[in-house]
Every structure is written in C-alpha cells, then in structure tokens.
Image (cartoon, rainbow, N blue to C red):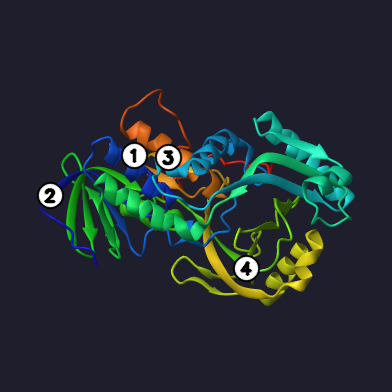
C-alpha cells in the first residue's frame, strides 16, 4: 500500500484512478495544484483497462460526438500530451447492416451522428469491400467513418502512471477510500491509509459513483453493465479496420501483433462488488458467431481468452460530469457509456473548469440524475436518450 502523508492538506483529491480520474489529476497537477489520487486497485485496471479499446464515433451517443471527436484527437496524439504511447492505431471504421431492418437503423443513426459532426458516410457493399477486403459479401450497406481506430487498453494504466508521477501527483494505488465529508472549506477523506484533507474533491469512480455520492448523502443511481469480451490467438492479417454492426452488438479489430479483440456489450454475470465473475456461454457463442459472420476468415482462428469487464451507465446513458449540487469545490466525473473514446476530453474539460480556464463547459451536471429522498415528491422523469 502506498504511504499517505496524512498531515498535509492537498489542493485537490481525486478518488478513482480510471481514465477520467487520472486525466483530471494530470492536468490539475500540471497547472500547479498539489494533487493526490486514490485508486483502490491498480491504476486504470477496472473499466478503463479491460474494455475493447475501441475509439469510434459509430457507437457514441449523438450528444457525445463533439466530445468524442476531440477525445479521438487526444488519443491519436497521446505521446504529445500524455508523454507515453498507448498503442493507438487510427484507421477506417465500418458499421454494417445485413438486413433491411439494420439498414434502416444504420441510416437513421448515421444521419444523426453526421448532423452532430461525425464524418460518417453510407457506402454500398462494393465500396465496403474495397475499404475492408476481409468483410462478408452479405453486407447490404455500411456506415463508413475515417475518424475511428483503437488503443491498447492494457497500456493505458502504465502510460497514465508514468505521466502522473512525472507531474508530481501523489499516487495512492491499492488504497481504498471509505468516505468523504465537508471539512471547513474543504473535504476530509477516510482512506485505508489514514485521514487525508483536500480543498477540492473529484469523485471519479465509474460504476462506484453511486456509493461515492452516498458519502455526501446523495442518491445517484448508476447501472452496472457486465460486458463480455474475447481475444483470439495471433493470426495472419484478416482485417485492417474497426468493424461493428448497426445494433452495436459487435466491435472487432485486429492488433498489430495479430490478435483480434471482440467486444460488443454481450452480457455476463457479476456486480459492482464482485466485478465480472462469470461468463455466459450463450452470449459468448453469439458474439463469436456474429464476429465470424462479419469477418469470415475468423472461423479459422482459435479463441485464446474471454473475460467480463464492468461498464457504468446513467439513467439517460449520458455522462455524470460536473459540480456536485450543494457541495462547493466538489465534482463528479465518469459513468460515460462507451466512455473510453470520450473520457480524456470530458475529463480535461472538467479540469479546465476546476482551474477556471476558458469558457465554462456545462458538461453533464448530475442534477438531472439525482433520485429523491424517501418520502419526497418525485422529480420529473428523465426521457431515455435515443439509441442514436
């Protein structure tokens, strides 16, 4: 466990060491704030380290497209601002439709995302095969986006860890935090290594934001998704793009060393306490069949490993990012569905807000998500965001 200098008062305490928390801590520390970051495990080894690493506009919510475009540029230039490589490959992306229903859905969603700024065009089967020769010939239509790609999620924590240490952040890995309460113009944190005080507080706990908000007496419901993912053995090149399908139940890409990572949100079993504890065979088989249907050459490969990773989702599937109502100098950042793509930019914008730089970005305040206390009048229902 990392020693914690508990007698010191920090300018900023960040709880949660995923992409969001690490990015906020990094930019605030570089701006001169004395920053301490707590992570109950190892940095970026929860949702930020076990996802499929996809960087795509075609699986991003419309409201997040402007953030995702900026974040994609950040990922692509990670060695410049992060100082370390995370294995980013920028390439074309295709979202496929195999049925008339999928084609209609794909056309609608591509149009909405294009209106939001994503450079997505619809192409026919012949053009899709030119872009991705490994593709099935049964494609009816495809959404084509040049702003796509992927990173090596495993490298994310290693890169952030080096950058945070270089920036002077007091990095406390393997140090759980049990609570945080206001303390005379700041906050007092109850950590496994003792009490720590800080003037500002950022809660960046992903699926654990619900428990963190409860420290301050707030009810912030967060849904937990248990996503199944799989990786093949190393094989000869079978694809050169990121491939998905209109329903969103597939993300598929081949890494430079030959493995193919297959994701798409097929659900396993688990919860936020135990993590992803059990794979569901039917879901795994369905995911693999869909992958082989999209890229037929995958039928000749063997599956090397499969796992389940946690993903957070709010009631309207948009982020929880902004100030905590009623608590000065306290913010929440996280629970971004498909947040690996958008995370760095949303977190950087929150850091800008903490540092009072530039025009304030409203981000995604949590007021809309807070559940009423028992016995209180219910708030107006929040409409489900369209799947586009």
Q: Nearer the observer, disc 2 or disc 1?
A: 1
Lower position in the chain sequence, tag 4 or tag 3 = 3
Lower position in the chain sequence, tag 3 or tag 2 = 2
Residue at mark 2: 8
Lower position in the chain sequence, tag 2 or tag 4 = 2
Q: Nearer the observer, disc 1 or disc 3?
A: 3
Q: Secondary structure at mark 4?
A: strand
What's the CA distance linking mark 1 and mark 3? 14 Å
Lower position in the chain sequence, tag 4 or tag 1 = 1
Q: Is residue 63 above or below residue 239?
A: above
Residue at mark 1: 27
What's the CA distance linking mark 3 and mark 2? 32 Å
Coordinates of residue 37 in the picture (x, y in percent): 29, 52
What's the CA distance linking mark 2 and mark 4? 45 Å
Coordinates of residue 93 in the picture (x, y in percent): 70, 46
Visible in this render: residue 333? yes
Coordinates of residue 289 in the picture (x, y in percent): 77, 68
Q: Secondary structure at mark 3?
A: helix
Give the total of numbered labels: 4
Quarter of the image for the C terminus: give it.
top right
Q: Is residue 227 above or below residue 331?
A: below
Residue at mark 3: 80
Residue at mark 4: 231
Identify which residue is drawn at 64% across, 64% down.
258
Q: Secondary structure at mark 1?
A: helix
Lower position in the chain sequence, tag 1 or tag 3 = 1
Label ID, residue 57: none
Identify which residue is drawn at 41% across, 23% down.
359
Lower position in the chain sequence, tag 2 or tag 1 = 2
Quarter of the image for the N terminus: give it.
bottom left
85 sits to left or right of 62:
left
């Amino acid at each position: 466990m990392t020693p914690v200098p508990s007698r010191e008062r920090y300018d900023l305490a960040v709880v949660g060491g995923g992409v969001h928390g690490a990015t906020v801590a990094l930019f605030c520390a570089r701006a001169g704030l004395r920053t301490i970051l707590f992570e109950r495990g190892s940095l970026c080894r929860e949702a930020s380290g076990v996802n499929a690493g996809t960087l795509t506009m075609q699986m991003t919510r419309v409201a997040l497209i402007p953030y995702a475009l900026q974040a994609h540029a950040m990922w692509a230039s990670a060695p410049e601002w992060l100082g370390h490589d995370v294995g980013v490959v920028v390439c074309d992306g295709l979202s496929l439709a195999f049925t008339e229903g999928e084609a209609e859905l794909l056309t609608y969603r591509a149009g909405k995302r294009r209106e939001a700024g994503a450079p997505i065009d619809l192409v026919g089967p012949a053009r899709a095969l030119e872009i991705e020769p490994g593709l099935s010939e049964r494609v009816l239509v495809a959404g084509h986006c040049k702003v796509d790609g992927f990173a090596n999620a495993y490298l994310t924590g290693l890169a952030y860890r080096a950058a945070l240490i270089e920036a002077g952040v007091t990095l406390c890995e393997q140090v759980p935090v049990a609570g945080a309460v206001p303390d005379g113009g700041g906050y007092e944190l109850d950590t496994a290594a003792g009490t720590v005080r800080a003037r500002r507080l950022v809660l960046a706990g992903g699926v654990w934001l619900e428990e963190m908000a409860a420290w301050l007496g707030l009810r912030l419901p967060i849904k937990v998704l248990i996503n199944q993912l799989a990786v093949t053995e190393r094989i000869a090149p079978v694809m050169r793009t990121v491939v998905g399908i209109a329903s969103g139940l597939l993300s598929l890409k081949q890494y430079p060393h030959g493995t193919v990572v297959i994701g798409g949100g097929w659900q396993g079993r688990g919860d936020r306490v135990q993590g992803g504890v059990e794979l569901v065979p039917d879901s795994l088989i369905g995911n693999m069949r869909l992958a082989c249907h999209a890229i037929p050459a995958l039928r000749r490969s063997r599956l090397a490993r499969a796992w389940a990773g946690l993903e957070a989702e709010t009631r309207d599937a948009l982020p929880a990012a902004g100030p905590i109502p009623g608590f000065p100098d306290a913010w929440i950042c996280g629970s971004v569905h498909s947040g690996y793509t958008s995370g760095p930019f949303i977190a950087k914008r929150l850091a800008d807000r903490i540092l009072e730089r530039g025009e304030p970005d409203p981000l995604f305040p949590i007021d809309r998500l807070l559940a009423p206390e028992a016995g209180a009048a219910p708030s107006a229902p929040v409409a489900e965001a369209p799947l586009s």
